[in-house]
């Protein structure tokens, strides 16, 4: 059982790093196009969320 816990933690760690890298790239792209980097909020232990007003036409 211990081996399963260790290997699943390793794969999750890699997955978390991949998501973090994508979010960092998105924040840079948003900033270079005149946007605000804080459009993407980090919820520690919960994930990421987009903070923007949505207008329905």
Image (cartoon, rainbow, N blue to C red):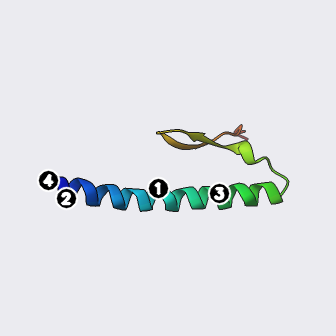
At label 4, counting other C-alpha atoms closer than 10 Å, the crowd grade (few under 14, some 14-19, many 20 or more) is few
Quarter of the image for residue 33 reads bottom right
| Residue named by callout 2 | 3
Q: Position of residue 32 (x, y in %)?
A: 82, 60
At label 1, counting other C-alpha atoms closer than 10 Å, the crowd grade (few under 14, some 14-19, many 20 or more) is few
Looking at the image, is mark 3 or mark 2 nearer the viewer? 2
Q: Considering the numbered disc 2 on the image, is that residue within a helix, a strand or a loop?
A: helix
Quarter of the image for residue 28 reads bottom right
Q: Position of residue 50 (x, y in %)?
A: 63, 43
Measured in 3D between alpha carbons, the distance from the residue under mark 2 to the one under mark 4, in whole angstroms, is 5 Å
| Residue named by callout 1 | 16
At label 3, counting other C-alpha atoms closer than 10 Å, the crowd grade (few under 14, some 14-19, many 20 or more) is some
| Residue named by callout 3 | 24
Q: Residue at x 27, y 61 (%)?
A: 7
Q: Position of residue 13 (x, y in %)?
A: 41, 57
Q: Are marks 2 and 4 in contact (CB under 8 Å)?
A: yes
Give whichever of discs 1 and 3 has the lower sequence position. Answer: 1
53 on left or right of 5: right
Looking at the image, is mark 4 or mark 3 nearer the viewer? 4
Q: Residue at x 66, y 61 (%)?
A: 25
Q: Quadrant of the C terminus?
A: top right
Q: Considering the numbered disc 3 on the image, is that residue within a helix, a strand or a loop?
A: helix
Q: Are marks 1 and 2 in contact (CB under 8 Å)?
A: no
Q: Are marks 1 and 3 in contact (CB under 8 Å)?
A: no
| Residue named by callout 4 | 1
Foreground pick, 37 / 17: 17
Foreground pick, 33 / 57: 33
Q: Considering the numbered disc 4 on the image, is that residue within a helix, a strand or a loop?
A: loop
Give whichever of discs 4 and 3 has the lower sequence position. Answer: 4
Measured in 3D between alpha carbons, the distance from the residue under mark 4 to the one under mark 1, in whole angstroms, is 23 Å
């Amino acid at each position: 059982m211990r081996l399963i816990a260790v290997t699943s933690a390793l794969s999750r760690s890699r997955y978390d790093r991949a998501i973090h890298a994508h979010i960092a790239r998105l924040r840079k792209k948003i900033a270079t196009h005149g946007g605000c980097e804080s459009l993407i909020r980090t919820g520690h232990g919960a994930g990421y969320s987009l903070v923007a007003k949505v207008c329905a036409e």
